[in-house]
Image (spheres, grey):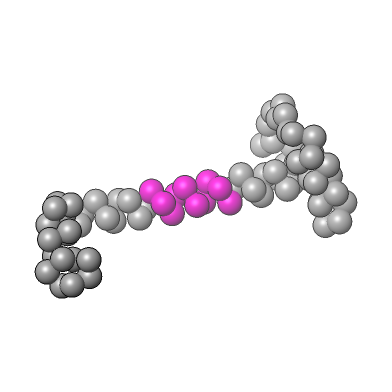
């Protein structure tokens, strides 16, 4: 990533997390910034996948809770 696209932010970590990040950075020959950037990208990608799933499920028919319970009882599941 070029410096012109990078932005600085101050992030406060619990001391044990900061120590773990520094150790992992040293072990993986990465920087703490790289590890944090990767983790944030992964979290945002998960959010995007969740939003897409919600959008897909939005098209599904609504089920009433009472109807689901009645059906489970009718089928001997409860």
User: Taking 74 as reference, is 33 left or right?
Assistant: right
Image quadrant in which the C terminus is located: bottom left
Question: Magenta segment: does it hold 35?
Answer: no
User: Taking 72 as reference, is 4 left or right?
Assistant: right
Please name the predominant secondary structure of the magenta segment in the image: helix
Q: Quadrant of residue 61?
A: bottom left
Residue 4 visible in the shown view: no
Q: Which residue is depicted at the point 38% across and 48% down?
A: 51
How many marks can you see? Answer: 0
Q: Is residue 17 or residue 38 the one in the foreground?
A: 17
Q: Position of residue 68 (x, y in %)?
A: 17, 59
Q: Position of residue 53 (x, y in %)?
A: 35, 55
Q: Position of residue 42 (x, y in %)?
A: 58, 51
Q: Is residue 7 or residue 11 the one in the foreground?
A: 11
Q: Which residue is depicted at the point 29% across and 56% down?
A: 56
36 shown above or below 49? above
Q: Is residue 14 or residue 25 the one in the foreground?
A: 14
Q: Is residue 13 or residue 29 the one in the foreground?
A: 13
18 shown above or below 73? above
Image quadrant in which the N terminus is located: top right
Q: Which residue is depicted at the point 24% across and 51% down?
A: 58
Q: Which residues are magenta?
A: 42-51
User: Taking 53 as reference, is 73 left or right?
Assistant: left
Q: Position of residue 75 (x, y in %)?
A: 15, 72
């Amino acid at each position: 990533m070029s410096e012109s696209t990078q932005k600085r932010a101050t992030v406060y970590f619990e001391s044990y997390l900061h120590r773990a990040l520094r150790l992992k950075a040293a072990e993986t020959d990465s920087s703490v910034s790289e590890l944090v950037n990767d983790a944030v990208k992964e979290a945002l990608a998960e959010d995007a996948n969740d939003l897409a799933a919600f959008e897909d499920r939005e098209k599904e028919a609504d089920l009433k809770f009472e109807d689901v319970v009645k059906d489970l009882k009718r089928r001997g599941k409860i």
